[in-house]
Amino acid sequence: MTAQERKAVLWDWPTRLFHWGVVICLPLAWWTAEEGQMNRHKWLGYTVLVLVVFRIFWGFLGSRHSRFADFLRGPRTVWAWLRGAAPDVPGHNPLGGWSVLVLLALLLAQSVSGLFNTDDLLFRGPFHYAASTELQGFMGELHEWAFDALLVMIALHLAAVAWHQWGRGEPLIQAMLRGRSEGRSGLQAPVPAWRALVLLALVGGALATAVALAPQPPRLW
Ligand code: HEM
Ligand code: HEM
């Protein structure tokens, strides 16, 4: 990529890493839960959790079009866009921006609730013993509910992407893969890569510390 192209990146690499990381880990998390492979399920869930928490911070610290301020727009802008007005920034469109927030909230609920969950057999999430019986029950329900809601949102997401990509001929997928695409590039140079690396290390480190400090099962004898 030339310096000029790097400057014009729409989705910086951390945003793309987050996206494709989730796309790979989520189906695998479902599959491992179905198969009862709880150790693998746990690690996939941790990965999604770190990616999502990272992405939320990146919504404040990341490159211009990854920031919430760039794509969470007021109701008037959303309404105008629904009535055919062209978006005034090249990133997520005004309605799509809100759907990104919902997807992030659901991914967070899914992965956090797992930390408290149990399969009622041999596996318990690391924070299971830190919670009251009520909270354990609630998190178990949330883990199932959030997954159903995620399936609905992902179906809508894929339908919307497919409509823009093939119905309207806009190269969205290329931009999410390569950072930019024909006729769609960013308005500002991306923030430095070290910022994402430090943030990822901090989020991963915080989760590892919390898991290490989590209460152990009560002794039975
Ligand atoms: C597990 C399934 C998926 C989830 C949970 C998901 C979630 C998301 C999220 C949260 C974003 C916002 C990115 C950000 O700003 O951080 C996004 C954007 C995007 N996703 Fe997905 N995604 C999924 C699958 C896919 C697949 C399979 C494709 C394409 C083959 C795709 C194509 C895109 C594209 C093109 C965008 C950018 C949309 C735009 O230009 O505004 N996604 N997705
Ligand atoms: C985003 C990441 C995750 C996804 C997509 C996911 C998805 C699922 C799904 C689809 C199930 C089956 C639901 C059911 O039939 O009850 C499940 C069960 C479970 N998950 Fe996760 N999970 C994630 C993260 C986690 C994490 C981080 C943990 C704990 C470290 C965890 C612990 C569990 C447990 C203990 C069960 C068994 C529940 C039961 O048997 O009723 N999950 N998960």
Image: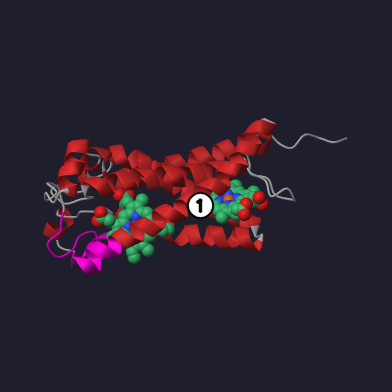
How many numbered marks, from 0 up? 1
Q: Residue at x 19, y 42 (%)?
A: 79
Look at the picture and state if 78 lies above or below 131: below
Q: Quadrant of the C terminus?
A: top right
Residue at the image position 73 percent from the left and 48 percent from the top: 120
Query: Quick one: which residue is furthest to the front in this view?
Result: 83
What secondary structure is found at the residue carrying circle 1? helix
Q: Is residue 177 visible?
A: no
- Cβ(mark 1) to ligand 2 < 8 Å? no
Q: Is residue 216 left or right of residue 20?
A: right
Tell me the crowding category of disc 1: few under 14, some 14 to 19, or many 20 or more residues within 10 angstroms, Cα based. Answer: few
| Residue pointed to by mark 1 | 148
Q: Residue 62's spot in the image, x, y percent?
A: 27, 43
Residue 90 visible within the image: yes
The residue shown at (20%, 60%) is 180
* The magenta stretch spans residue 184: yes
Q: Quadrant of residue 212?
A: top right
In the image, residue 209 lies at what x, y percent? Answer: 55, 37
Q: Position of residue 163 (x, y in %)?
A: 26, 64
Residue found at the very far top of the displayed protein: 132
103 or 42: which is nearer to us?
A: 103
- Residue type, label 1: Asp
Q: Is residue 1 left or right of residue 203?
A: left
Q: Quadrant of the rendered structure where residue 4 is?
A: bottom left
Residue 66, given in percent of the width and then of the height, sits at 26, 46
- As drawn, which residue projects farthest toward the right? 221
* Residues shaded magenta: 161-185
Question: Residue 201's quadrant in the figure?
Answer: top left
Residue 144 part of the magenta-drawn span: no
For the N terminus, which image quadrant?
bottom left
